[in-house]
Amino acid sequence: MTATAERAEAAPRVEARGVGLRAGLVTVAFLLAALLVGLAVGPVHVGIGSIVRSALSYVPFLHVHQPLDAVDRAVLWQVRAPRVALAGLVGGMLAVAGASYQGVFRNPLCDPYLLGVAGGAGLGATLAIVYASAAATGSSWTVPLAAFAGAIAAVVVTYALGRSAGATHMTGALVLAGVTMATFTAAVQTFVQQQHTQQLQNVYAWLLGGFSTATWRDVAICAPYVAVSSLVLVLHRRVLDVLSLGDDEAASLGMDVARARLAIVVAATLGTAAAVSVSGLIAFVGIIVPHTIRLLVSTSYRAVVPLSLVAGAGFLVVTDVVARTVLSPAELPIGVVTAFLGAPFFAVVLRTARGVR
Amino acid sequence: MIETRDLWVRFGPVAAVRGLTLRAEAGGWTALIGPNGAGKTSALRALAGLAAYDGEVLLDGRDARRLGRRAVARLVAYVPQKPETPAALTVAEYVLLGRTPHIAYLGGEGRRDREAATQALRRLELERFAERPLGSLSGGELQRAVLARALAQAAAVLLLDEPTTALDLGRQQLVLDLVDALRGDGLTVVTTMHDLTLAGQYAERLVLLNEGSVVAEGTAADVLSAPNVATHYGANVRVVEDEAGVFVFPVRR
């Protein structure tokens, strides 16, 4: 036996791997770089040095001189910054919710829209666009509010439906109930949409999702939900590892499985609904980001949940930059970009990770 | 010590366990035997608090229902027949999950938890495997990891549902020897077992169940008679008894 093997035997490292210093630093660096690129890139170019100095000039007692003129300042802080912030919040939320749903349902293909969030939000938004604007009573709050309410209503019905199957089959029943709900809301949504073809363009634009109209108010609507939800989910990271042993074994370890599942589902759903209500339906983030973390870092939810939050934020900020620059001044729907960038990236990760594992 | 009084487990109109009264003393090994569908697993799940039941389960004389889930999990560790072993978790991470009943709901492991897990790994000679993913272990090593997780739970009662399924003859003996050694530390062991010879070799008390009720109980010599096995298993066997124990051999009809 070699000396190293003997040492390892004498003192095994008995700890959960968690995030790890290197993975943590790399992910945070990725997010910071993404934020800076998001602020710098656009029709009006602003240098990264100017961005940093401009930001510092708002910090009291530092006495940093504001390097930008009024127009550039407005472009940077009133147009671009809220857009970058919103993309970050939504991306982080979708990724962390996707990771949590995958853990709770022990199914790697689950996404944050699993329990009917997307269908409900789509229906709510469609109804608001069609009827509120037809009645000319719609404010800029109407659509997000209706989308949020639709998402929550759909998930509540899904959960009630899944629960009626009894505790033993609940996970499977919930997934089926989610599919049922998604199909039903899609049917109603399509019907309403077809009855009001004059609004088709608006409905379609909302469904595809994007951040072109992002304001600080959108950020303010969305941020509290995202903050609370992701905090709850990050706190549940060890619970998710326990749940990965299955309902029975988790219960035999003293876990109240139904309560833990409800807490996680409520947090993930509220956050997702808030994200969707301000951004529309952006696909793929909730699947690709957690899986990339699993392949590159660890499958333990102690790593997957916090890293998905940070990496998801960076990913959607970068995606949004691509969406608004490729065909500038026109914009690509961000959902197209997430899939177009995400799928090949994921394929590369799958191929390279195969050799490592 | 764990005991049941008039325990019933029902699935709708069907009763899987009918009025089971059982007493497993501290440091003892009780094996529940019986044909498929006799109610062995249901009884074990009720003992672990995983199946709804009528009647009483007493842990050190206290009603399990009043103790609450976490308190029960600190007293009783349960290993199902086919445990979930997420392939990418390391052995150490998996064994640490056994500490869950000792950790606050949203808390993390402390020094004592890591020590308990390290001891469990050492007890089952798994130190070398601590950082290996579960997916890379052989069947026998995996079963030891599962036992280590149960041991890390630091419970006084260990419930094992068919602990030797899918293991070869040597690994079966190895695992059962390990369980037997743990008993020396004062652990109460209750297992369900299909292999009657092995059950007789390791458990000092056998409880033969059929259709949810106890039909025979006692030492291997009392329970493992050819007529008993023929009646309740519908099997044709030859039973040989010598100083090494009782051996049950299937004989083709």
Image (tube, coloured by chain):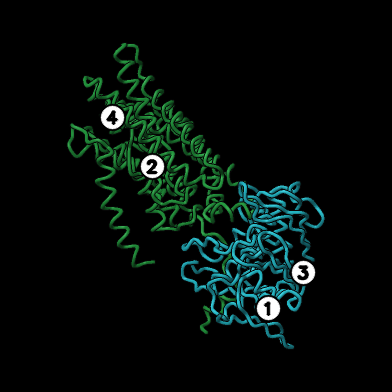
Q: Amino acid at mark 1?
A: Ala
Q: Is residue B85 above or below residue A256?
A: below
Marks 1/3: CA–CA distance: 33 Å
| Residue at mark 4 shares a chain with residue at mark 1 | no
| Residue at mark 2 shares a chain with residue at mark 4 | yes
Marks 3/2: CA–CA distance: 52 Å
- Crowd band around label 2 with a 10 angstrom C-alpha radius: few (<14), some (14–19), many (20+): many
- Is the Cβ of the residue at disc 3 closer than 8 Å to that at disc 2? no
Outermost residue toward the right?
A: B61
Sequence order check, earlier mark of 1 and 3: 3
Badge 1 sits on which subunit? B
Badge 3 sits on which subunit? B
- Per the image, the residue denoted by label 3 is B186
Badge 2 sits on which subunit? A
Tell whether A73 sits left or right of A271.
left
- For label 4, the SS is loop
Tell me which corner region of the image, top left, top right, bottom left or bottom right, holds residue A98: top left
> Closer to the camera: disc 3 or disc 2?
3
Q: Residue at x 39, y 26 (%)?
A: A147
| Residue at mark 4 shares a chain with residue at mark 3 | no
Q: Amino acid at mark 2?
A: Ala
Label annotation for residue B226: 1
- Per the image, the residue denoted by label 4 is A212
Q: Amino acid at mark 4?
A: Ser
Task: Give the color of chain B as drawn.
Answer: cyan
Outermost residue toward the front?
A: B253
- For label 2, the SS is helix
Badge 4 sits on which subunit? A
> Closer to the camera: disc 4 or disc 3?
3
Q: Amino acid at mark 3?
A: Gly
